[in-house]
Image (cartoon, coloured by chain):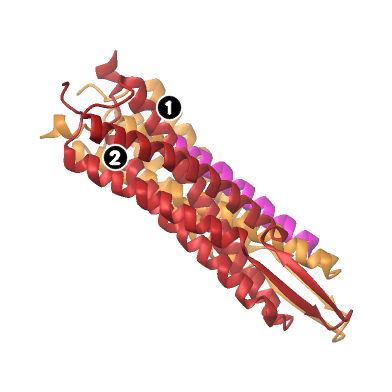
Chain colours: A red, B orange
């Protein structure tokens, strides 16, 4: 068996982070897509049902959650394979380079999804409060909850991205 | 003169990215802090002047712009020193590790500032349009402009972060 590039402990830390990221994104997904509210508009005397996708930013959040979810699922599976079989499924410098860029892109995607979610929720809630639309409090609280889980997933992705940066083959050594 | 860790061309590319980041953030800052609008509220028959800091997300954008601005200024100065003097002001593995983490944090900060700006602006504008508050179009357009410049600064920071990841001393080689 070829010596692994990093120790078993770092593989397990890596796996735990991937699972935590996966679970956070799964819960974030459920919280986000089930987010809806009914608002009674006294001005026009009508009730209006709103869903998560009525906020544009929540659509972007959904996209970032789905990409992150699929990626964390694949990475968790690869980590489990590595730990169980004792050697990685894919080998070679290209794998480290791929992981480096993929971890980086996914971490930016989750960071932006979470930030956009927090920003839009905070200001929409302030606007709704100013208009007296208290019916929306629960709706925005679920938005905050989903953005918070996305932030947790981002923190896992950022740590994984640090690991994959250290695992990057140096240009000088790969030539 | 000690051999530089990377070629002169990559130093120049790096410098150009730092200057572009610096200029984008400077313009983003000016656009954001000068953003204001006067809305006439027909319901209560009054005029209301709003400034950039009335949107909570814009305050976060401002913070991310200021941090990025100061950082890009310092990094530009260090790059210029390196190119003019022929050797860096600070040397040693610790500098590469510092640059790696600092570039990473700054790039996340700019990414989240830009994303939050786009998200909040898009949804606040949609809400304002739904309420017939067309007075705010210019205000939100400036919000979009500042977020776009922040996105450009983020792209520079992300590229610089890739460079500093490759320049990272490997754990195995630094022990």
User: Magenta span has B12?
Assistant: no
Report whether A15 appears left or right of B60. Answer: left
Q: Is residue B81 above or below residue A66?
A: above
Can residue B7 be seen? no
Is label 2 in a helix, a strand or a loop?
helix
> Which quadrant is the C terminus of chain A positioned in?
top left
> Label 2: chain?
A
| Residue A97 shown left or right of residue A38 in the figure | left
Q: Residue furthest top?
A: A175
Residue at 49 percent across and 49 percent down: it is: A110
Q: Which residues are magenta?
A: B136-159
Instruction: Please give the residue where the numbered disc 2 appears in the rendered image.
Output: A163
Marks 1/2 same chain: no
Question: Which residue sits at x=45%, y=57%?
Answer: A151
What residue is drawn where x is 86% and y is 68%?
A: B132
**Residue under mark 1: which chain is it in?**
B
**Would residue B108 be found to the left or right of residue A16 on screen?**
right
Query: Magenta: predominant secondary structure element?
Result: helix
User: Regarding mark 1 in the picture, which secondary structure is present there?
Assistant: helix
Label 2 crowding class (10 Å Cα cut-off): few <14, some 14-19, many 20+?
A: some
Give the residue drawn at x 52%, y 62%: A146
How many residues crowd around disc 1 within 10 Å: few (fewer than 14), some, or many (20 or more)? some
Image spot of residue B6 (x, y percent): 31, 24
- The residue that label 1 is drawn on is B12
The quadrant in which residue A161 appears is top left
- Where does residue B26 sit, x and y in percent of width and height? 55, 51
User: Is label 1 in contact with label 2 (beta carbons under 8 Å)?
Assistant: no
Q: Is residue B142 magenta?
A: yes
């Amino acid at each position: 068996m070829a010596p692994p590039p990093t120790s078993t402990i770092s593989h397990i830390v890596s796996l735990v982070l991937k699972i935590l990221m996966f679970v956070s994104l799964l819960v974030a997904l459920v919280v986000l897509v089930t987010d809806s509210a009914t608002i009674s508009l006294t001005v026009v005397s009508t009730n209006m049902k709103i869903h998560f996708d009525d906020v544009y930013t929540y659509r972007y959040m959904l996209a970032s959650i789905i990409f992150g979810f699929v990626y964390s699922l694949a990475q968790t599976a690869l980590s489990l394979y590595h730990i169980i079989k004792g050697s990685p499924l894919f080998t070679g410098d290209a794998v480290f380079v791929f992981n480096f860029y993929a971890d980086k892109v996914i971490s930016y995607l989750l960071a932006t999804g979470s930030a956009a979610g927090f920003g839009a929720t905070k200001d929409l809630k302030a606007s709704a409060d100013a208009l007296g639309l208290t019916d929306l409090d629960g709706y925005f609280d679920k938005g905050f909850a989903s953005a918070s889980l996305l932030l947790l997933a981002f923190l896992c992705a950022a740590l994984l991205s640090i690991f994959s940066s250290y695992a990057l083959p140096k240009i000088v050594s790969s030539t």
